Amino acid sequence: MTITSVPFITLNRFENGFKEKFLTGVNELFDKTQFIGGPIVASLEESLAKKTDAKFVVGCANGTDAIQIALRTIQVEKDDLVLLPDMTFWATFEAVVNVGAKPVTVDVNRETCHWDYETFKEAVDKFKPKAAIMVHLYGHASPDTMKIRAYAKDNNVLLVEDGAQCFGTKVDGKSVLGSALIATTSFYPAKVLGASGDAGAIFTNDEELAQTARVLTNHGRTTHYTHGLVGWNSRIGTYESLFLNYSLEHIDARLDSRREAVNYYYEHLQGLPLKPMLSSDNVDENGYCAFAMIDPSLRGDLIETLKEAGIGSGTIYPGAMSLQEGADKYLAGKIDHGNADYISKAVLNLPCFAYITKEELEYVVGTVKKHFNNM
């Protein structure tokens, strides 16, 4: 079979029998009218806890809500300063704003594309924030994660970890989500563990934080008609939970497939101006996306070549948070060494999804090599 195109991502490659099993389960839920809560949701939370070694997991409606609920859970309030990376998805920034707090963007390391200890320390010492959000982007994590956690704790900075892209990622052999004070993830369909619609979750090992998060996801209810807090309507749906339950049965195979793709790019694109990036020695990434760095002056032409060959690509993300138009009136401060801005102009994401074939990978690599050979 001759390959003539490769999508950047596809959401329709499932294991044999997966679709049929899910649709059968949907029919059962429909017949039982189990639409909100119930044993399917409880089963998902238990499975997620087991998979990540977290003591408590609270499902919610989406990944953005998860961050907002986590911030409220640790009592981030109006006008509190919250540090966040200058390289992340907009949801991290808007979550801080939506709880009434003030965001401070902090630059990332140009090599790892994540926070490093020294810059985090600089930001804590300068701004004295109440909280910080460490983002585990690209399915990777900062090699300084443990040092950042320790410095935050020693300086009374409450640390939320945005793990929207890092399900399955480990630092020093431990799940990022399961070992954090409080962490969040997104089950947006394009994630390594994606739902059939929007969904998210909060992870913690603190029972009190878990209980507060659960109350906040359900209108602040302490009983059905009593409300101890002002919360959200952010309950995870039963259909999404069913889909995720079945997906968890195959998550290891899906992660292995993605990691093999990332490793293939790394091995076969050596010596080119496009530099695929792997994790540091103490970080096990999850294959969320194959991200590489390229001289910004070369990126546009390569993207055009890929497009002409029917190959999808991405630029995750094409702009630093502090430079977004919507950030101006909310930004309370920043530490900017120019790295996030550079990365936004230099990053290029190649096709990567569960069960991408060797033939598809060969076609992508061959197209990239031909492009540079013809320069």
Image: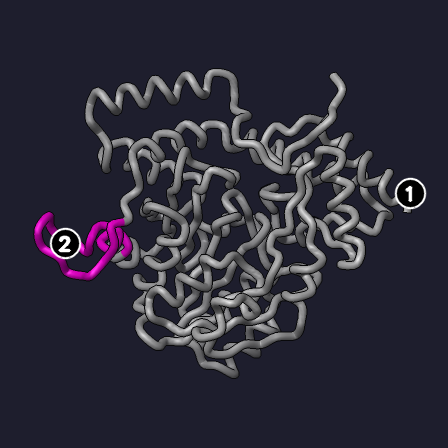
Write down the quadrant of residue 317 in the picture: bottom right
Residue 115 left/right relative to 55: right
What residue did someone put label 1 on? 374
User: Residue at coordinates 39% horizontally, 30% vertically from top-left?
Assistant: 243
Number of disc labels = 2
Q: Can residue 153 be seen in the rendering of this structure?
A: no
User: Residue at coordinates 91% horizontally, 42% vertically from top-left?
Assistant: 373
In the depicted view, which residue is nearer to us: 290 or 210? 290
Indicate the amino acid at tag 2: Thr
In the depicted view, which residue is nearer to us: 129 or 177? 129
Q: Return the disc, 2 or 1, that comes first in the chain's sequence.
A: 2
> Is-magenta flag for residue 226?
yes
Indicate the amino acid at tag 1: Asn
Residue 170 left/right relative to 93: right
Q: Secondary structure at mark 1?
A: loop
Q: Residue furthest left?
A: 225
Give the crowd class for mark 1: few <14, some 14-19, many >=20 residues within 10 Å: few
* Mark carried by residue 282: none
Q: Can residue 250 be seen in the rendering of this structure?
A: yes
Indicate which label's residue lies in the foreground, 2 or 1: 1
Residue 122 left/right relative to 224: right
In the rendered view, tell whether residue 157 sits above or below residue 354.
Answer: below
> Is-magenta flag for residue 181?
no
What residue did someone put label 2 on? 222
Region rendered in magenta: 213-233
| Picture coordinates of residue 369, whole percent (x, y) | 85, 40
